[in-house]
Amino acid sequence: MRTTEDSYLHKGLRKKLVDQIREKGISDESVLLAIMNVPRHFFLDSAFEKQAYEDRAFPIGEEQTISQPYTVAYQTQLLQIKPFEKILEVGTGSAYQASVLAELKAKVYSIERQKKLFEANKKFEFLKQYRSLRLFYGDGFEGLPTFAPFDKILITAAAPYIPEKLLEQLKKGGCMVLPLDEGDNQRMHRLTKQLDGTILEEKFDEFSFVPMLIGKRG
Ligand code: SAM
């Protein structure tokens, strides 16, 4: 069962978490404020409230995880989101990252391949406040051609290669942030589609994500 109470104790734990993430190198104050505003314990079973404010990934069922807060902040910072930008997220999972993006006033289109996780999020009351957040059940490798192009694309699972269809759905001037498979770990990449259509590739730190898998799971 989920909790719906956000007490002073929770806010205090969240403030400590934000301080830790800042110490690890996240400097974008709008991202830190979004982390401060989203009650991460709402996204886990109430039995794991304490763990919600530790800076680590945590199981959410279906062999999936809610990403580590530092990783969420890291990917969000690389995206350099401005209000009203259209963002495609691949891998809704717990919808925590999607909520952080919605806090930044982005228009979020988030896809999940696991039906159970998608359905749980559809019933998740907290998410209803984010009118700019839309959830889809599907295969992220296909993207959402009906809603393309996107200003930014975020992949929150380890991509085995750069999904070509997603690059096609990216606006010129936009960027895609993704962890690319390099064996056990993945290196965070930012691919910027330049105005002449060429792709600028930048590489950042290493992370460890669950794999991005082809096809839907019912
Ligand atoms: N963003 C999530 C959050 O805030 O909780 C964390 C995501 S978890 C690390 C990765 C998610 O990507 C899982 O829920 C997994 O089912 C999903 N996923 C993996 N491959 C996918 C694909 N091809 N399309 C859509 N979702 C996918």
Image (tube, helix red, strand yellow):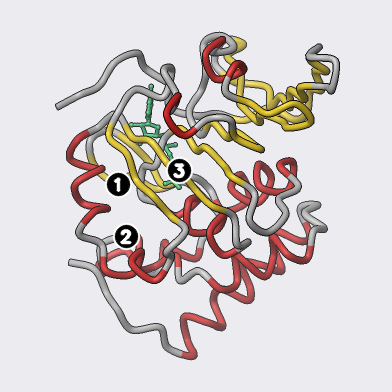
Circles 1 and 2, Cβ within 8 Å, touching? The answer is yes
Q: Residue at x 14, y 27 (%)?
A: 218
Gap between marks 3 and 2, in whole Å?
Answer: 22 Å
Q: Residues within 10 Å of mark 3 (few under 14, many from 20)?
A: many
Q: Nearer the viewer, residue 26 or 197?
A: 197
Q: Residue at x 24, y 32 (%)?
A: 114
Residue beneath label 1, please? Answer: 60
Q: Residue at x 68, y 59 (%)?
A: 83
Q: Residue at x 54, y 52 (%)?
A: 107
Indicate the position of residue 23 as horizontal and vertical percent values: 79, 60
Whether label 2 lies within 8 Å of ligand 1 gets the answer no
Q: Amino acid at mark 3?
A: Tyr
For this orientation, the residue located farthest to the bottom is 8
Q: Secondary structure at mark 3?
A: strand
Whether label 1 lies within 8 Å of ligand 1 gets the answer yes
Query: Relative to 133, is 23 on the left or the right?
Result: right
Residue beneath label 3, please? Answer: 109
Q: Quadrant of ligand 1?
A: top left
